[in-house]
Structure formats: structure tokens, C-alpha cells
Amino acid sequence: PPVSIWYLSLPSLFSSNPRDFSLPNSSWGTEMRQLYEHYNSQCEAVTDGGEEQSGLWNRLPSYNRSLKYAAGGVYLSKIIQAKARLFTRNIRDPGAAFEYVIFANKKEQRCVCIFQAGHLLEGPPGNVHGGAIATMIDTVTGTHACVHSGPVMTANLNINYRSPIPLGSTVLIESSLDKKEGRKTLVKCKVTSADGARLHTEATALFVSIGVSQLIQG
Amino acid sequence: PPVSIWYLSLPSLFSSNPRDFSLPNSSWGTEMRQLYEHYNSQCEAVTDGGEEQSGLWNRLPSYNRSLKYAAGGVYLSKIIQAKARLFTRNIRDPGAAFEYVIFANKKEQRCVCIFQAGHLLEGPPGNVHGGAIATMIDTVTGTHACVHSGPVMTANLNINYRSPIPLGSTVLIESSLDKKEGRKTLVKCKVTSADGARLHTEATALFVSIGVSQLIQG
């Protein structure tokens, strides 16, 4: 039986222009900006001349609200529905918590996330909480599985922590498609320092496809 | 090589009376309060007559700051050090995010956590983010391993998500000691509905003991 449902952002259902949290802000450090530029410059774009430029990568926008219906027909109070915010985007103060942007490479079936860990994510003294790392792994692999297979739920996360991530640092989270069998999508993932030299975390994630009706059933 | 370090709260190092986040507040619903009373009434206490009453359980206090030194000698900016807050206690608005209290039963080598999931923890529409669930599993099993083995780091989390947790609901997180071999402490964990009837999540967690010097080395 399924599992923590994953979902795609649905900005068109919001009242007006929602904030895209994946765009650069003043809190981003040098490493975060340089890596962003590296991938963003290889994205699909419309040139000044109006021509479409194809690209290896797609930047995925990121919003802090989703549909206001519980899955599985569970009743939620109107207050909770109105106040609900995506866990990874629930603090508006730039740089305080999760700063990240995900790029998808459909051809190579991989995603890369640039993640700058803010001071509100502390676990061990001076380092990022293991749960915050798990949260980013779930986010990147879940988004990847969604891009590949449509709506899915997280069924399993298996995470090996190799070395702590200092608060304030920027890391790379790279996911690659392992296999897809029927309703199952298996994704591998690793977290490294921005230069790729230090391995922080390795993980596998299993997702199960669900119908859209399961997602918005209220 | 280790891993996301876990740690014990050290309130005595703070400037003045720190807030104990494990105590009841106005956001706690009926289920949260009833479960709290159930375990709290079985805790060690000093009676009105001044006598010590022994108990099956101990309530573990919970603070939002730890030592201000990075592990492994990593340099952290003064700003990040001053602003750092424990990930699970980084939002002061009662009821908005993680409301939880952990009780430890040393004799039976198990812990129980009562967790009320606030509206800022959304993942799938209307349900708790898989990363927020992973965060609470890391917190409860890590605290349990610490109580049993002293300072440890998280080495592995293996989480099976069975059914989604609706935003706003209260769940029980129960951990039990699986085994201890040398520096390794293995803890099992399950998340159920408050009445125990519905299984939400199952997990195993592996921790590796570290010296206190590794924790506060700056």
C-alpha cells in the first residue's frame, strides 16, 4: 500500500503571480551563483532574436503552495488548508533555510540540485540536520521521478551519511534514474561538496506511480 | 567514515533560561494533550511532600540551540554561529511546524514520541512531507541512541513509507533498541496513528558512537 505521495507544482491554480523560489536572491553565495549560471546557461531559452534555443537542461520552477485537497479523502480544517506551505519553502527569509534550484536533463535521465544550507537547518553543532539532508534527497529524487514517470509517491528512502555538511555551505545533489519497472521508479542520488571532491551522502529512493485522481481526491 | 553527527542538548551552556519546547502549549490538540498526560503521569517526579517518585518514563527536554562549534574543525562564520537553530525547533509560532515531545523508558530500552504535524510541513497536498517524517525519525531514533550509547552520528536511515500522514494530525513514533555491537547502535522505529491502528511509516536507523571531542572540536 502506498506511501508519502509526491506531486508536481501547479502554479496555474494560484491566485496571482506566485514567487518562484528557484530564482537567485541576495542570500546566494558565490558557489551557489556560479553553479546556477553553469547550468542555467545550458538551458532552453528564447534568444533576443526570438528564436528558441534548445538546451541540455531545464530549470524547474519551485512554489510554496500546492493543491488544497488531502489525498485519500481525508478531511482537513479550512485553517490548515489555507495556511499549508511546502515544507522546503516554508521560511520566506532568504538564505535562512533551504535555498535550492533543480535542473533536469531529460536526455541523460538525470537531475542536479544546487543546495545552500541555511542556519536554521542545524542538527549536530555547526552541521546540517540529517533530516534536512533527507528532505532534500526526497525532494530531488521525487521531482526526478515525477519528471520521468508523472505523479508518484515515495515508498522507500535508504540514506547513507558519509560526512557532515557544514551549515552555510553549498552542495551538489545529483540523481540518476536506476530503473523503471511497471509502477516502480528507482532513483539513485549522491550529495557532494560543490567542487565534487567530498562525498557527503549517498541514497536510493523508490517511488510508486499513482493516478492524478488519488492526488486531488478531496 | 562517519556521518551526520547526533548530539545531546546542552541547556546549561546557554545564556539564561532557555525555552523547553517539549512542554505543552496552546496549539496542542486533544490527542496530543491526552497522550502527553498518559506518559507524563508515569514519569519520575518529586511529590508535594518532597519525596522522589520513581517512574517508568523520563520526559526529555528540547531546546533550539546547541554548541556553537563546528565538528571536524570546519570554520563557520560568526553570523551563522549566532543565528543557528535546531532544524526541528526553528519556527517559534506554536503549532506551525514540529510539535513533539519524547519520553524515554530506559528499562525497556524504548522511546516514544508524540508528534503533531503543523501546516508548514506540507509535502503531497494535505499531507506531511516525506522529509519531515524522516526528520522526526532521525530525531527520535538519534535521541534514543544517544540516551543508550552517548554521543553518536547517524550513519544510515532506511525508511518505508506505508500511508500518508494528514497535515494537522497527531501520530506516535515508537523506537526500540535492536542491537549494539561495538561502536554501532541499531534502532528500529514505527510511526502510527495516535490510536495505534494505522501504520504510517517503518524505519531502521544505524548510529556510530563518537567521542565528545569530535562533537565540540572547533
Image (cartoon, coloured by chain):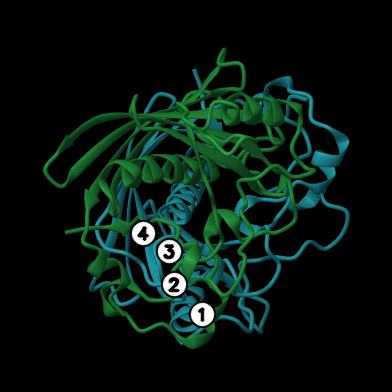
Chain colours: A cyan, B green
Q: Earlier in the sequence, mark 2 or mark 3?
A: 3
Q: Secondary structure at mark 1?
A: helix
Residue at the (72%, 50%) spot, across then down: A85
Give me the C-alpha separation between circle 4 and circle 3.
Answer: 18 Å
The kind of residue on which mark 4 rests is Glu
The residue to which callout 4 is attached is A174
Quarter of the view holding residue B90: bottom right
Q: Earlier in the sequence, mark 2 or mark 4?
A: 2
The residue to which callout 3 is attached is A128
Q: Residues within 10 Å of mark 3 (few under 14, many from 20)?
A: many
Q: Chain of mark 3?
A: A
Q: Earlier in the sequence, mark 4 or mark 3?
A: 3
The kind of residue on which mark 1 rests is Ile
Left or right of residue A68, residue B129 in this image: left
Of badges 1 and 4, the one in the foreground is: 1
Q: Residues within 10 Å of mark 4 (few under 14, many from 20)?
A: many
Q: Is residue A11 above or below residue B187?
A: below
Q: Is residue A141 above or below residue B73?
A: above
